[in-house]
Amino acid sequence: MGIKLEFLENKLTARISGEIDHHSAADFRQQIDNFINKKKPEKIILDFNEVSFMDTSGIGFIMGRFKTAYNLGIKLKVINIPKKLERLVKLSGIKNLGILE
Amino acid sequence: MKQENLCINEMNLNFLSKSANESFARATISAFIAQLDPTIDEITDIKTAISEAVTNCITHAYKSEIGTIYINCKIFENGKILIKVRDKGIGIKDIAQAMEPLFTTGGSERAGLGFAVMKSFMDKLRVSSKVNKGTTVLMEKSIIRRNITSVK
């Protein structure tokens, strides 16, 4: 469970694994935001492939990173959202941000 | 037929409003309701709703102190699950407003969807609250009973 950050050709890929709740999201947020501020990537990919559970804190985490990236002019995409999280994602309306792939 | 509504088991869980306990609460409730042989989807729905209710206690009810969160869970012969999540925190002044999707007082990292998720993922949701006394969230969900005897 955790977050793995990879930085290649100005692209930051954050692979999140395990459960995202209010507790773990705080740690993920801190790690990724520190990295963004330090390295100023051109593009950010949030990979949700290994996320086993998430509540609305995960939605808040995506929205927060989207805002951060948007304000800094960074492109952000969220990829590989598992099928079991679809119901929550649909209910949240974050599809309208146009960042899900 | 009255037998169908028989409460077959009950548990109480009290713990401190520390965010590390969010996963503890989810895991404990899912272990308890496993007796009803729910599907993975049913467990996910209930885990998500519990997580939202407990997170509300931590981030709102006890936002400036550590308090105790009380969970009571009952399971019934007919597959009904009743979960009560209670706190003795600051309470909610306007429940209708708090339950509105996207409404939050929790800042930019909070989606304001907690109650919307509890409502959508469970069959019934009832919230009662008194300012400075606390809040009680009552949730109900019926899971489809499969043949229990085959589990033996």
Image: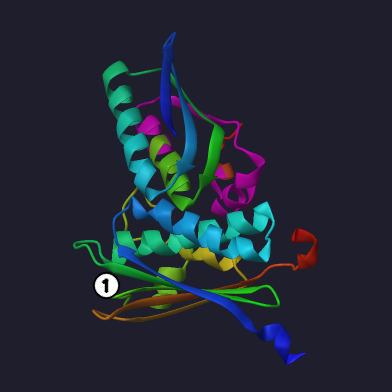
Image position, residue A15 (x, y; %) = 48, 27
Helix, strand or loop at disc 1?
Answer: loop
Image position, residue A87 (x, y; %) = 63, 51
**Which residue is most to the left?**
B65
Answer few, some or many: residues within 10 Å of disc 1's Cα (few below 14, many 20 plus, some between 14 and 19). Answer: many
Residue at left 64%, top 45%? A84
Q: Quadrant of the C terminus of chain B?
A: bottom right
* Count of marks placed on residues: 1
Location of residue A76 with respect to B122 vertically, above or below: above
Magenta stretch containing residue A70, yes or no?
yes
**Which residue is most to the front?**
B152
Q: Which three-letter amino acid code belongs to the residue tagged 1?
A: Gly
Task: Give the colour scheme shown.
Answer: rainbow
Residue at left 55%, top 41%? A52
**Which residue is most to the bottom?**
B2
Find the magenta span and give its range.
Answer: A66-94
Circle 1 chain: B
Dividing the picture into quadrants, the one containing residue A25 is top left
**Which residue is most to the top?**
A9
Q: Quadrant of the N terminus of chain B?
A: bottom right
Instruction: Find disc 1 in the rendering and name its residue.
Output: B89
* B48 or B33, nearer to the observer: B33
